[in-house]
Image (tube, helix red, strand yellow):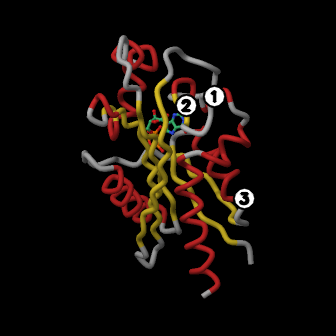
Amino acid sequence: MQKKVFFITSNPNKARECKNILSFFSIYVEIIKLQISEIQSDTLEEIARFSSLEAVRICKKPVLVEDSGLFINILNGFPGPYSSYIQNKIGNYGILKLMKGIKNRRAIFKSVIGFCSPKKLNQVFVGEVHGSISYEERGKEWAFDPIFIPDFSDKTYAQMSAEKKNEISHRRRALEKFAIWFNKEQNG
Ligand code: ITT
C-alpha cells in the first residue's frame, strides 16, 4: 500500500519542494491549499505543533504542516517566526537594508514539520541549515532564496538547481527525519 500524507499549506513553493523530497522516501503527498490560523509564538515548534492539531481537526486525515523562518544572528534571530510577515512587508530589499554595513552576516534557516494523525499521534521534526546573508540578491527563486548562502556552498539557494536545494535544504533535513520516523511507524 502506498504511504500517503496530506500537506496543508498556502505556499505553492513549499508544496512543490515537500512533494519532491518525500517522493525520495516513497511517501506520496497530496496538497491541501489552506491557510491555518497560527498562534503567536516565539518558537516555530510551538506554531507547527498547534497548526498540525488545528489541521487534523479540520481535515480528519494524517496531516503535515510546516513553519519555517530565517534567523539572523546579529538581529537576535529576527525575523524568525515573523519571517512570512517580514517577507511580505519589506522583502529581501528591506532585509538587505537592515544589514547594510554589517560584517557579521551569520544566519540559520529553519524548518519545523508538524505531523498529526486523526488518532492524535502528534510529532514535530526540526531541520536547520547554517549559513549567511548575501550582500545582494543572487538568483531568482522564491522569498529568501536569493539572499541565503548555506555554509557548504558559495551559491545562494536561488542559484542552485531545484534538485540540489532539495538535497541539502532545511526543509530536506526536517522532512527526512519525518520520513524515517513515518516509514518505521507504518511498518511497525
Ligand atoms: P504556510 O501556508 O505553509 O504557512 P507561509 O509562506 O506563510 O506558508 P511560513 O510562515 O512557514 O509559511 O514561511 C515563512 C517565510 O519564509 C515565508 O515568507 C516563506 O516564503 C519563507 N520561506 C520558507 N522556506 C523558504 C525557502 O526554502 N526558501 C525561501 N523562502 C522560504
Marks 2 and 3 sit apart, C-alpha to C-alpha, by 25 Å
Residue marked by disc 2: 149
Which dot, 1 or 3, sits closer to the camera?
A: 1
Residue sitting at x 47%, y 49%: 128
Sequence-first disc among 2 and 3: 3
Mark 1, residue position:
155
- Can you say whether 186 is above or below 167 in the image? below
Q: Quadrant of residue 58?
A: bottom left
Q: Position of residue 90 (x, y in %)?
A: 38, 18
Residue flagged by tag 1: what amino acid is it?
Answer: Lys
Residue 62 point in image, percent of width and height: 53, 68
- What's the residue type where badge 3 is placed? Ser
* 8 or 67: nearer the viewer: 67
- Contact, mark 1 vs mark 2 (Cβ under 8 Å): yes
Q: Quadrant of residue 186?
A: bottom right
Which of the image's four quarters has the N terminus? bottom right
Residue at x 40% of width, y 33% of height: 84
Residue at the image point whose x is 44% and y is 60% from the top: 114
Q: Which residue is mark 3?
A: 23
On screen, residue 10 versus residue 86, left or right, reads right
Which secondary structure, mark 3? helix
Given residues 102 and 183, the one toward you in this image is 102
